[in-house]
Amino acid sequence: MSWKITSDSTCDLSPEQLTKYGISLIPLHVAMGGSNYLDGVDATPADIYAHVDAGGQLPVTAAINPAEYTEFFSRFAKDNDFIIHLCLSAEFSSCYQNACAAAADFDNVYVVDSRNLSTGHGHMVLAAVEMAAAGLPAPKIVERLNELAPKVDASFILSRLDYLRKGGRCSSLAALGANVLKLRPSILVRDGKMTVSKKYRGAFAKCMCEYIKDRLTAGGEIDEKRIFITHSGLDEGLLRLAEDTVRSLREFDEICITHSGCTISSHCGPGCMGVLFIHK
């Protein structure tokens, strides 16, 4: 049986993982400086940061439309017994709704709401690949993915709040106060939505390590097969520190370090990082 796993670009998997597992992405749109770009195709987080640093308005990301999904699915539908496409959480975007509308034109395309973003979404994509490779039929894979979604632990810690302020998600006064006090808020994904969790205080390296320890010792059994350290632009020293901290707490079979795409980066700005894993 032949199959294809596809995803929105928001899964933030590395180019190496996409190639290794044969995963194809469809990019979200990024409106910046009066022009429209495609996430990861002709726009990168570095482009966003350069645009904002030069005084430009914060870019706006937009969903993939049904016609784009139809064209995308048609590339693979004839040559595969089934396609499973995983979308950014329906709470964040109309991508899932649009993908479902497009999938209605095919009898072998299945669309799954990841209920997540970034590599929380990416965990779901890799799980789909593993189940398909094991020979599971598409309906069973979809069923198991829906069961897996609430077990994904996705969170991030922010080193700065100026992008949230520019995007209207944080007041100027709150951002100023946070900067003065060196507050580093953490964001959790729960039921497909983002909520502010604990606020850390102090140098970012210290706060990052405290955040990682909190996430990996918060209780509940953790599947130690794979963890993602996903960031929007940390230097090598901080990435090594993050990886060393993870290794000191848990023995994961695989630690994957990936850079977030335009969607996360345009909302959080540079200096955001998260540890994302799955509970048993």
Image: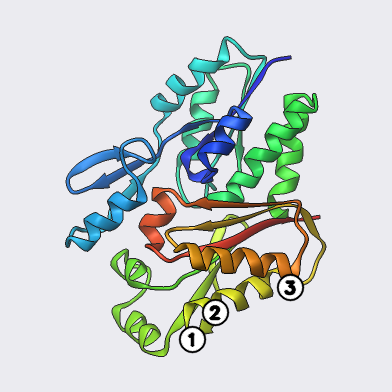
For the residue pair 255 and 261, the one nearer the viewer reads as: 255
Nearer the viewer's eye, disc 3 or disc 1? 1
Task: Left or right? Give the position of 263 relative to 229.
Answer: left
Q: Amino acid at mark 2?
A: Cys
Could you tell me which secondary element the residue under label 2 belongs to? helix
Residue 67 in picture, x, y percent from top left: 39, 24
Q: Position of residue 46 (x, y in %)?
A: 32, 52
Residue 85 in view of the camera: yes
| Badge number at residue 202 | 1
Q: Earlier in the sequence, mark 2 or mark 3?
A: 2
Q: Bin the neighbour count of mark 1 within 10 Å (Cα to Cα): few under 14, some 14-19, many 20 and up.
A: few
**Residue beneath the point at 35% across and 79% down:** 175
**Which amino acid is tagged 1?**
Gly
Q: Would you say the residues marked 3 and 1 are in contact, meaning their CB atoms lie under 8 Å apart?
A: no
Contact, CB < 8 Å: mark 1 with mark 2? yes
> What residue does disc 2 label?
207
Q: Earlier in the sequence, mark 3 or mark 1?
A: 1
* Relative image position of residue 165 (x, y in whole percent): 32, 71
